[in-house]
Image (cartoon, rainbow, N blue to C red):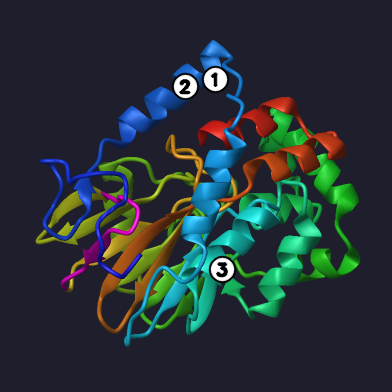
Amino acid sequence: MLRGARSERGPGKPDREPNGARQTDTQAVYDRRRRFFRAGETSEEGDRRALEDRLRRASGPLLQSAGMRIAVLSDIHANLHALDAVLAAAGEVDAVWHLGDVVGYGPDPDGVVDRLREVDAKGVRGNHDAAACGGSEIDWFNPEARRAMEWTRAAISDATRAWLTDLPERRTLETSELVHGSPREPLWEYVMSVPVARANLAVLKSPIGLHGHTHVPVAYLEDDGRVEVVGPDGGSELVLRERRALINPGSVGQPRDGDPDASFMVLDPEGGTVAWHRVPYDIEAVQHAMQSAGLPASLVARLSVGL
Ligand code: ZN
């Protein structure tokens, strides 16, 4: 899809902003997520042929641009199929940045770290990365996350552990501050509301704050003291217009906004734009690898529904 193109999910909704982004109700996403887990739903069997069609359509670079292009990835969570689909879709970029939680949940931590090294990705440490290196963060995990983390700790190579250990908690690149959770609590805080976003925009040292952790793509924009929440459609572009911003690219390896496609963002710091993208990938292949590794069934199932 060309830069700035509309989502391929149908005609524009009336509430969409002129730049293609739309107002979002993050609470609605979290309500759906809670309902899913309470109901104990299981994944639907994917239609293999439909998936293959979508993968074919998605192959090739999504964007073409003369400006600087930085692929911003977060919460890859040891999902190499999703990472490779995202890197292929991003096409040629000037840099790859990541916002932590490189490992945890997924079946291929070494493969993901190797790939990030290959593309010389620069980034920060997430709570799962810290736990994988032996940190006490594991004590805060729910039972499924903890089981997956115990598997991850045993599975990773010394080289992967060393690479994860070297990740800083925060990092400033170009005009952006990179953290996993939030600028004031880099490892743990979830930015899911305007008051929390406002407090973090107040301590942000750069014009743009890039964060992950919630696995939900969204931007909080500060304009004359007001904080506005904007959510993306796939392929939509947001023009920052000098506004300070806290921006989440969504999750590559375990999306939680109801869309199972891998989520990522392309940032042009010079042009002051970000574009979110969704990329289909072979979810079933990842699920089979997770089952073979003995990872928890609930973590396998949620990939099908993006929750
Ligand atoms: Zn995460």
The residue depicted at 86 percent of the width and 37 percent of the height is 292
The residue indicated by pointer 1 is 37
Front of the two marks 3 and 2: 3
> Magenta part mainly helix, strand or loop?
loop
Image x and y of residue 301, in percent = 64, 29
Taking the magenta stretch, the answer to whether it contains residue 129 is no
Task: Answer left or right for 225 relative to 258.
Answer: left
Magenta stretch: includes residue 234: yes
Identify the residue shown where x is 55% and y is 43%: 51
Inter-mark Cα distance, 2 to 1 = 5 Å
Q: Quadrant of residue 224?
A: bottom left
Residue 18, quarter of picture: bottom left
The answer to whether the residues at label 2 and label 1 have Cβ atoms under 8 Å apart is yes
Q: Judging from the image, what secondary structure is the residue with disc 1 in?
A: helix
Query: Could you say where residue 30 lies in the image, as x and y percent from the top left?
Result: 40, 29
Q: Indicate the secondary structure of the residue bearing disc 3.
A: helix
Residue at 64% from the left image edge and 80% from the top image edge: 120
Give the number of the disc on residue 34.
Answer: 2
- Which of 35 and 205 lies nearest the eye of the viewer? 35
Count of marks overlaid on the render: 3
